[in-house]
Each structure stands twice: as structure tokens, then as C-alpha cells.
Image (spheres, rainbow, N blue to C red):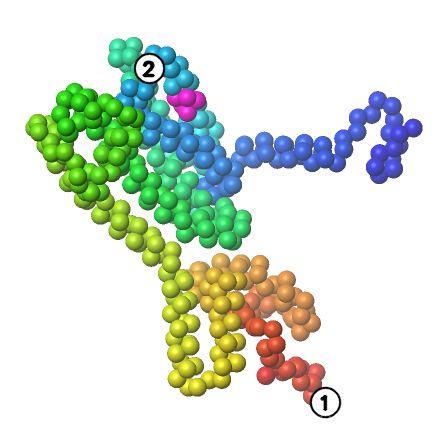
Amino acid sequence: MKHNTSGEVISPGQTVTSGDEFTVHYTRIRFLRRLTVDFCPTDLIYVIWLFFVVAAWNWNVWLIPVRWAFPYQTSENIHLWLLADYTCDLIYIIDILVFQPRLQFVRGGDIVVSRNETTNNFDFISLFPLEVFYYFTGVNSLLRFPRLLKVRSFLCFVHNLCPVAVLVFLMLFLFLYVRVIRTSMYLLYSLHINACLFYWGSDYEGLGSTKWVYNGKGNAYIRCYYFAVKTLITIGGLPDPTTVFEICFQLINYFVGVFAFSIMIGQMRDVVGAATAGENYYRACMDSTVKYMTSYNIPREVQNRIKTWYDYTWKSQGMLDEQELLIQLPTKMRLDIAVDVNYAIVSKVALFQGCDRQMVFDMLTRLKSVVYLPGDFVCKKVRTHLSSRRRCY
């Protein structure tokens, strides 16, 4: 006779599923059921899938210009390029047929899940089959240009990356640095396109035909990228163009470079300013408080405790007054947050255990979180001989 972990008798031929196997099986069932329902754009499973879509989109965005301009696509490795291309196309197809029909969106304050409505957001244009012209032109990467039109998935991924962060410090890190990284990638991509155009122009004029064009020595991409950096960022120190084509190309480069680089610098300044606005506000409040205490000769011990309170509150909450965030929310949302944060604590207080539930909810919306340091005087309980009420001073 055999027994399972709970002591039950197992008859011969009976199949027993262990706890771990049952958990794995149940998780798989939940995952498969999750694929058949609608997705919110901030769902973790959808953001993970967007990562693969964005990876396929980046393959097309970065390598289509390289394969068009540089001689990296040859008859010996063409099968590897096509394998990667069609793998990315498969990811696009799965996204359009499986995920996008189940993607919810909000219109007029209502969540829309109707298939007739969600299909309007399909980006079929990104799979427009221009590859049929391979039969006439050969494998030309420019015919895959429609794959670049799936930029909406990239923007959606960047926008929804922060809300899925389960840790507060990870969410803050993503919020502060994703926009900086994105802006930097825009600048690098502009230089990347300019490098491809410079090699194409050099090949059009003839490699090494003049001092201005690429001379064909060394790594072609690195040397052309170096030219793009010096041109778009207007560093200078380049050979003077000689032909009409070279002069026009250089003029357009300088013109676009001045505007593109100034826009990037302005965006970077705004991103860094927005990322540090909260800390600057904290520093300003703390400096004003210290100046006030110094002008009134507040004792040094009290000043140190106030500085400690500022430092602890900022490090623990990332803000000085959480009410500044909640005041912009509708009353219903403020109530939901207050219930989730404070109801479990307030319900344990004997004074409120016999109160009406709705009254407690109304009171929660008026509570204000206050941080006290160890040893701070909070309140004093006084019990009178006529009443059992507790008064706080």
C-alpha cells in the first residue's frame, strides 16, 4: 500500500500529481486562458511581448539602411539575412493576428473591447509585401521599408515600461532614465543614417576619388560614422568638398545637423530638468527651512532633528507631501487609494470598529500621512472620570 503526502491510500494504477507539478500545470492553464482574453496596454504579458516586437522593429530600423548602403549583404550570407528578416516578419504577424485584436483602448471614458473597433488599430501596412519585387531587382533591403512603420509598438513599449515595474526604485529608475536613453538613441540613429548616406555618396562619386569621400581603407562603417559625428555636431576639420554633389551634400548636412543637434540638446535639457525637478524642490524647501531656523536662532539639536526628518522623508517616500499628488485625482480614485493604504490600519483601532463602513471610508479621504522620528511626541491619551472618550493633544 502507498500513501501520498496527506496520508491517503493510493490504489494501484492511480496517477498522483505532486504539489509542484500541479502548480506548474495550473500556471500553464492560467497562461493559456490569459491569451484568449483581452489585454490592457499595461499588462505585464503584453509589455513582455512588446519587447520582442520592438527587437524585431529595431532589427529593421538599424540594419535596412546598412544593408542598402554598405556592401555587407553578399551572395554568401544572403540566406542568413533572409532568415532574420522572415523571423521578424513572423513576430509582426503574430502581433497583428494574436495580440492586437485583444488590445483594449479607452474612448470617451469607456473601455472598448469590440473586435470591430480594435481591428481599426491594426498596422497591416507594416507588412506590405514589397518583397515580390525581389524577382525583378534582387534582394534589395529598401523594399522592406514598410517594416519601419511599426513605430507605434516602440512608442507603446516605452510608454508602458514604467507602470509595470513592481519595485518602487525600479519604477523611479525607469522613469528618470528611459527618456534620457530614448533621446540619446534618437541622436545615435541620426548619426547612423548620416553615415549610411555618406558611404552611399562616396560610392556614387567613387571611393577615394577625392579627399572628401571615403577612401575605402579601414572599417567602412566606423570611418563613415566618424564623418557623420564631425558633420552633424559641426565639429569641423573635414576636407573641403570639390564637386557640386559634395558641396550640396555637405550643405544639407550642416543645415540639418545644426537643427537636429539643437533639438536634441533642448530635449535632453527638458528631460534632465523634469527628472530632477522633485529633488530640486526638496533642496529648496530644506534650504528655506534651514535659513528660517538660523534667522530665529533655533537650537542646534532641533535643527538637526528637522534636517533628519527632511532626509528620511525624502528617501522613504520620494516626496514631502503625498497630498500634492492625490489632490488632482477624482474623489472615487482618492477613496480607492486611501482604502488600500489605510483601511487595514484604521480598522484595527477600537474607536472605529463599531462605526459605519461608509463613514470610515469618508474619514480615510481626509487623513494625512505624517512621518515622525523615533522619540517624537505624537499624542497623549487622557481618560476623564465622566467619559471614556480619548482626547489627543
Q: Going 33% across and 52% down the picture, which residue do you hit?
A: 271
Q: Please name whichever residue, 326 or 165, is drawn nearer the observer in this view of the structure.
A: 165
Most distant residue in the bottom direction:
385
Q: For residue 87: magenta?
A: yes
Q: Is residue 333 above or below residue 228?
A: below
Q: Please name whichever residue, 22 or 118, is drawn nearer the observer in this view of the structure.
A: 22
Residue at the disc numbered 2 = 74
Q: Please name whichever residue, 16 or 178, is drawn nearer the observer in this view of the structure.
A: 178
Earlier residue among tags 1 and 2: 2
Q: Going 50% across and 76% down the picture, which residue do you hit?
A: 304
Find residue 181 and name its label. none
Q: In this view, does 244 lie above or below 264?
A: above
Q: Going 42% across and 40% down the picture, which residue do you hit?
A: 157
Q: What stretch is highlighted in magenta?
A: 84-89
Q: For residue 18: magenta?
A: no
Q: CA–CA distance between discs 1 and 2?
A: 97 Å
Tell me the amino acid under the disc marked 1. Answer: His
Secondary structure beneath label 2: loop
Quadrant containing the C terminus is bottom right
Residue at the disc numbered 1 = 385
Q: Which is in the foreground here, disc 1 or disc 2? A: 2
Magenta region, mostly helix, strand or loop?
Answer: helix
Q: Is residue 390 above or below residue 361?
A: below
Quadrant containing the N terminus is top right
Most distant residue in the right direction:
1
In this rendering, would 195 be left or right of 351?
left
- Label 1–label 2 contact, CB within 8 A: no
Secondary structure beneath label 1: loop
